[in-house]
Amino acid sequence: MTAAAIAFDQVTVAVNGVTQLDRLSLRLATGQPTVVIGPNGAGKTTLLRAAMGLTTPGHGTIRGVPERRAIMFQHPTMLRRSVAANLDYALKAATVPRGERAGRRDELLALVGLAELAERPARRLSGGERQRLALARALARDPAVLFLDEPTASLDPAATKAFEDLIRAIAERHIKVVMATHDLGEARRLAGDVVLLHRGRLVEAGAAPQFFEMPRTEDARRFLAGELLL
């Protein structure tokens, strides 16, 4: 079983005087991936950062977030080291015992399909390869919950498919994935449940089949039809 459900209770977050989350109450279910969607500026990234503990709410509470958690941002920075050394650094930072790091590194490189590129400088990887290495670094923390902030936004279709396949494999390992995306097709392919935000507020949340086939709110219906939410 995955970690307990994460619950937002009347959470408000303001950054530089601009409200990013506005009295948000939400329960992120356990199990299959939760996909967070919404227009630019909807609060998707802020939701992930708040759940990760990187942003402190000015009001409200967030409960149920496990200590073992990790986040991957849209544009992760690669260290000026090899692929293997990038992952070694992540394992050390995650306090994995020295004697276990080599085995864990090899396991993670195999999982993300980078074993044959272990000695290549990380900054010489393709965009898709960099994202898979960033994912491996996040997994070095052995998270119960993994937050992903639009990880495929800049990838071509082949690299996107490879990354989505990894997300499915991770979910099968009983790691709860919470992912923000602007791509409705990706949300349909991956989501067990969906959260739609607009201007920092919850528009609708629920199981993916119901959300996509019978959305309950007018704003959700408009968003799925490709209309702008104002």
Image (cartoon, helix red, strand yellow):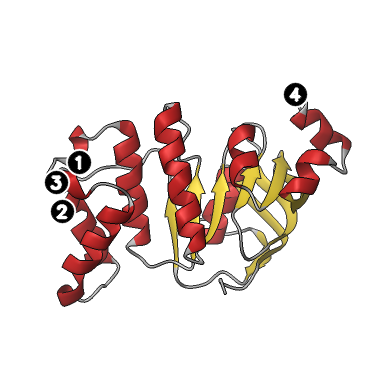
Mark 2 is surrounded, within 10 Å at the Cα level, by few (under 14), some (14 to 19) or many (20 or more) other residues, namely some
Q: Quadrant of the N terminus?
A: bottom right
- Residue 66 image position (x, y, % from top left): 52, 72
At 30% from the left edge and 42% from the top edge, which residue is drawn? 77
Q: Earlier in the sequence, mark 4 or mark 3?
A: 3
Question: Which amino acid is tagged 2?
Answer: Ala
Q: Which residue is mark 3?
A: 81
Question: Which amino acid is tagged 1?
Answer: Ala
For marks 4 and 1, give the CA distance: 39 Å
Q: Earlier in the sequence, mark 1 or mark 3?
A: 3
Residue 85 badge: 2
Q: Earlier in the sequence, mark 4 or mark 1?
A: 1
For marks 3 and 2, give the CA distance: 6 Å
Mark 1 is surrounded, within 10 Å at the Cα level, by few (under 14), some (14 to 19) or many (20 or more) other residues, namely many
At 64% from the left edge and 34% from the top edge, which residue is drawn? 184
Q: Which residue is mark 1?
A: 122
Give yes or no for contact between labels 4 and 2 (Cβ–Cβ under 8 Å). no
Give yes or no for contact between labels 2 and 1 (Cβ–Cβ under 8 Å). yes
For marks 1 and 3, give the CA distance: 6 Å
Query: Residue placed farthest to the top in the image?
Result: 227
Question: Which amino acid is tagged 3?
Answer: Arg
- Residue 110 image position (x, y, % from top left): 27, 54
